[in-house]
Amino acid sequence: MSRNAIKISLTHFSQRLNDAYEKHSTFTFLLGFLILLFAVLYSRGDSASVFPPTLTPRHNSGEVAAGLALFDAALKDGDYSLAEIYLINAIQREPSNMKTITALKQLAYNNPSFDSVALERVVALLESLMFKVSPDDVSKVASLITELSEHAIKSVSNTNTDIVEADDISDLLELGPQSPIDSQAIAVYVEELQQFLDNTNSGDLATHAEVEATRNSWLFASQIHNSISFIESCLTNVENLEKSDRLDSQAAVSVIQAAENALAALWTVPMNKLPDLYQKKVEDYPFLIQQKVDEIAVARSQKSTQIIKNREKTARAQLKVTKIESRCKALQLAISEIQKEITIIPSHSVRNDVRTKLDSLVAELQNQRQIQFDKYQQFTLNKCVMLAKGFQDEWAVSATDAINLFNRHKLYEVNQSLLSPEVSRCFNDILQKLFGELGPEETVSMQMVLGDSNRKTELEDF
């Protein structure tokens, strides 16, 4: 099955879109139109305009393999909703991988609830993937659509439901499915109504309109119910992951993203058209989902939080050492590592807490540098005081006495570039007194010693 199969599949999709429009099924038409719009945009390379950058699929074979493993496990456990989440997540990360795409057949054949609604969801995905796979695989995707469609029809036909056979359409309209949340019964009921519309003439316009309105109403209710059930399943799965201390896993991220995507479809429906039972749920979902998003982000931030806590503890412990330079280096190292770690923290609230700690460490580093600077000024002033005292004790100094005073108090250790203006003036006054006692040769010799950088005491020495 090659080009003819592709043509038939695409024609079938377009026909369904036209049928939805002609029969005033606004929700179905809008859904089909959005799918087609997405496919066209993606084929033009504009997928980033449809999804924000954070949702753009990442090509990571390791994550795809992990997703397939989780899919197999969920399928084995009979959790078909979770299995679907894992599989679609893996497909989105590598849309051209036929291994993940063909796994949709495994999902359909194992899921006893694979009905027309589930088929619509899977076919929509496959039709979008036809624009992403390699040319050689397009026919395979088209064949898969046909196979899954036939399987869904057989599944619905073989399903035992509580629908009573009705010879008269009025009986069928009166009966309906026994429960508004029985998706299988609704699927069969809607199919019965559709068969009536397809197999009878439109002479009785009132009856046709009533049947069509009833069909659309039940189809709409089924779609809303399935979306809400899917979101509820996602939230339950997140809670289960939290109970098993796996809230920081990639699985939790995938599940909550699936809930967000399903919620986006509900926002296209006017709230006043939702059943009363669902209105409050839909209103609360954004807050519930955002709460779970925040909790997952906090859980995934714990590793970085612990690293930052250890770095801060180590840096503050170094504040007890005598040498100020050691304190400053410890603070600088902690600040540098925390600045790197903060960029990978997903939680906004945790990032704010870390920034507060980072600001505190930066302030402490500035304080230690100021203490170091002040000690250097005091170091220089002590030399000036001792030298001035030497002048008082030996007022009638000679050139030899001046050189002795200079060497005894090691004035050459002072780096004048590190002095404040006030201390610099004091130091220069002392030097001038010494130079006043020296001849030209002694003055040049003393200036050379003052300029020897190897003899300087630096801030780092404190």
Image: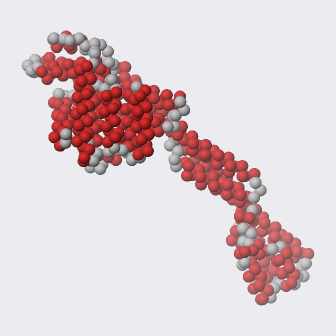
355 left or right of 215 in image? right
Residue 84 or residue 418, whichever sits in front: 84
What colour scheme does the image use?
secondary structure
Q: Quadrant of the C terminus?
A: bottom right
Figure disc tally: 0
Residue 46 or residue 404, whichever sits in front: 46
Image: 384 above or below 251: below
226 left or right of 430 in image? left
Q: Residue at x 80, y 88 (%)?
A: 439
Q: Position of residue 137 (x, y in %)?
A: 26, 44
Residue 272 visible in rendering: no
Q: Residue at x 28, y 27 (%)?
A: 117
Q: Residue at x 38, y 40 (%)?
A: 90
Q: Position of residue 17 (x, y in %)?
A: 20, 34
Q: Position of residue 109 (x, y in %)?
A: 31, 28
Image: 69 above or below 208: below
200 left or right of 312 in image? left
Q: Quadrant of the N terminus?
A: top left
Residue 103: name its quadrant.
top left
Residue 123 visible in rendering: yes
Looking at the image, the residue that sits furthest to the bottom is 440
Residue 248 or residue 25, whichever sits in front: 248
Q: Residue at x 25, y 40 (%)?
A: 140
Q: Position of residue 125 (x, y in %)?
A: 29, 37
Image: 279 above or below 142: above
